[in-house]
Image (cartoon, rainbow, N blue to C red):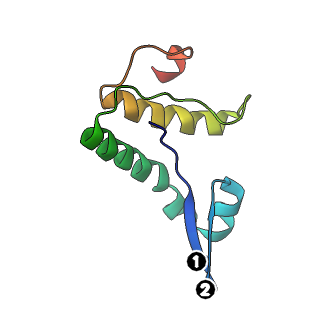
Amino acid sequence: MELSFEVQFIVLGEVFTTQNPAVTQQHLPAQFRAEILPMVARCYAAILEKFRPGFVYRACAHPNLPEEALEKHHFLTRAIIACGYYKGIASDVALE
């Protein structure tokens, strides 16, 4: 099972989606952006609870992520671990 997310906007009647934080910052105030990852984590949990896939594989789309992006990746990984999916990963230390 692959889990990913993007943000969808309707601006001046035009619909577009993005995974780019810079674009999201242009269109969404900080107090709302802060709710995105917790909402994604809750959605991941609901999907995993309903479908119970045999495994979930987490990977970064890009190598050498900056610290802020890596923290977001680890946040969502911890949410998946909280659902009972954990067999070990290369960066265990970052998740403690």
Rendered residue at 40%/53% (across/down): 39
- Depth check: give the residue in front, 60 or 94: 60
- Depth check: give the residue in front, 1 or 22: 1
Q: Position of residue 67 (x, y in %)?
A: 67, 33
Quadrant containing the C terminus in the rendered view: top left
Q: Quadrant of residue 53?
A: top left
Q: Is residue 68 above or below residue 25?
A: above
Q: Is residue 27 above or below residue 63?
A: below
Q: Secondary structure at mark 2?
A: loop
Q: Residue furthest bottom?
A: 12
Q: Amino acid at mark 1?
A: Ile
Mark carried by residue 38: none
The residue singled out by tag 2 in the image is: 13
Mark carried by residue 10: 1
Rendered residue at 26%/39% (across/down): 49
Left or right: where does residue 35 sit relative to residue 8?
left
Q: Position of residue 27 (x, y in %)?
A: 64, 70
Q: Amino acid at mark 2?
A: Gly
For marks 1 and 2, give the CA distance.
6 Å
Tag 1 and tag 2, C-beta contact below 8 Å: yes
